[in-house]
Image (cartoon, rainbow, N blue to C red):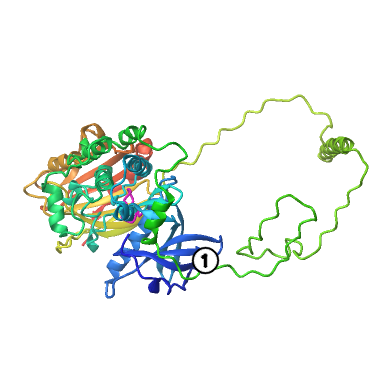
Amino acid sequence: MGDVVSETEAETATRVIAGRYRLVSVIGHGSMGTVWRAYDEFLHRPVAVKEVRLPPGMPQGQADEVRERTLREARAIGVLSHPNVVTLHDIAHENGDPYVVMELVPGSSLAHLLRTHGPLDTTQAAAIADAVAAALQAAHQAGITHRDVKPANVLIATDGRIKLADFGIARNISENTLTKTGITLGSPAYIAPEVASGGEVTNNADLWSLGATLFATIEGHAPYDPEGDVIATLLEVVNGDVPQPTETGPMAKIVSGLMVKDPTSRMTLAEVRRRMYGLLPEPGTSPFTLEDITEAEKSFIPSPKQPEPEPVTDAVAQPEPEAGSTGPSLADDPGPLPFTPSSSSYPLLDEEPPPVRVRRGVPRPLVYAAAVVLFFAAAGGGFAAARYAGGKPLLPTKPTLIEQPVVQPPPSTPAGAFVVRTGDAATLRGATGGTFSIKVPPGWEMFVEERQPKNLPVSTRVHYVSPDGKYELTVERFPDFYPTRKINQFKDAVQGTWPKDAFVASDPLILSSGNKLESGQYWKYNTVDAGSLRRTTYSNLLPMTDTDLWVVSLTVPTVEEDTGKGALFDQIAPSFVLTP
């Protein structure tokens, strides 16, 4: 998370965000913001609130990107519902800044637990491995790559729950890398070699980071120096030998199976969890003692001087228990609702209800029998009255079969009117000539990133993403592609980022557009990621100038590929034009 602040700083928390979340004390802070221990005054529960903190003098464009990263975490965990993932409660806005309101996990991070107690035993490490692997499985199946798995982002609650937190740089198909702001994609000591070298980030990167986290769990320290020079650490990750645990046993084999430089050769999450079966604690028990967690918690979460703020409520008289009563008493009044019921819809709350009179001496079975008779009499009378008022016979007629029309569900494809959007694929080095226009469905969000693909020149990619994150339109420009390269080299580079059994491409079709060196191509390919998420991508590869290759692509779920092509790609791709 970050450095823990002093109690003096924690005592300064007096703000209320969005009229609801009272900031109580600072849990910690890092380069991206501050995490507060807060109190939800509507639901009367503690929560965690992540606040964006911008360095003084930061340009507005970079500030917007930092705010976007905060919203990215919300989008990432908002689609996840898993016991090993920190739950998102709300997104609050105050003075234009977003605040991510999350579940507060009382306890310690794995990083602080390791600093306090040193390496964990096999049972504890197995519990960590199984929980984090389960969280990553859920994320990957939702199309999300965490990108920053490390001990500081593994939380251990006082009741033994283990949760993966901080999806702040997670990426799904709707996100970009935000490399323009200089944000490191992951922690150098836990980052995968292919990410450290600037390659494509896939779910396999999380497998390496999980292995590095488990390395620290059984060894008591990170596989690489987390306090060393960042560049030197990245070079060691890319070019050096993979560190091996000094411990022996099943957990060491898991680490060695995950920390493999070839992304496609890493142990799968399913295999990790399968190997944990015999190592996990007994069901219903936790391998962590309450003393261990609370001892680490003292250095992790400073206790506020003041108790939790209590809501201000009017005094309400509580009913006295009857004399001689041995039954349980009523719970305390929960306090007022966050809104006041309209007096026109509800009776006055302070009116005294009439006393209930109970006749004595009537046998209880006769009361029940009479109630049943009255119920059926009322039901039958109501049915007869309704039939008579509607001009229907009192006795039911012979039933007839009526064929009901089949109602087709609405298509999930976001079809509808398109709007013309403009974009700029200029590079950070100032390569101009990158403005274009293209038709895009309304409501799709735009993101821009500069990429350094392996074996290809630097490119600029403009993303347009549907609100639900299922569909992604990209316009990518390679300014220095020609005359030294051909389109087939681009296709080989794309295929090279996927395992052989996870990539299937169709034969290309020649397009009429192109430059004097070669013609354009239409290309379709299918992919399957580590979470078994199947997607189909349609691309037009367009040599638009003597130097630039442009790639217009649409990625959709494979189950909707036919609709995605006809309703989206065939409408969007022909509208792409360069603008002066």
Quadrant of residue 273 within the rendered picture: top left
Disc 1 secondary structure class: loop
Q: Is residue 161 visible?
A: yes
Image coordinates for residue 127, horizontal then vertical, percent: 37, 41
- The residue positioned 38% from the left and 55% from the top of the image is 108
| Front-most of residues 567 and 80 | 80
Rendered location of residue 574, percent (x, y): 28, 48
Residue ID at (76%, 57%)? 321
Horizontal placement of 559 versus 459: left or right?
Answer: right
Write the start and end of the magenta stretch as one range.
166-175
**Residue 139 drawn at (x, y percent):** 36, 45
Q: Main secondary structure of the magenta part?
A: loop
The type of residue carrying mark 1 is Glu
Name above or below for residue 429 compared with residue 164. below
Estimate how packed mark 1 is, as few (under 14), some (14 to 19) or many (20 or more) residues with alpha carbons within 10 Å: some
Quarter of the N terminus within the rendering: bottom left
Q: Is residue 130 above or below residue 163?
A: above
Quarter containing the C terminus: bottom left
Residue 417 seen in render: no
Q: Is residue 193 left or right of residue 118?
A: left
- For the residue pair 330 and 174, the one nearer the viewer reads as 330
| Residue plotted at (49% across, 41% down) | 410
Q: Is residue 167 magenta?
A: yes
Quarter of the view holding residue 11: bottom left
Asked whether 514 falls inside the magenta stretch, the response is no
* Horizontal side of residue 337 vs 271, given as left or right: right
Tell me the residue that label 1 is attached to: 308
Residue sitting at the far right: 361
Residue 254 in the image: x percent, y percent?
Answer: 26, 37
Residue at the left extreme? 484
* Total residue callouts: 1
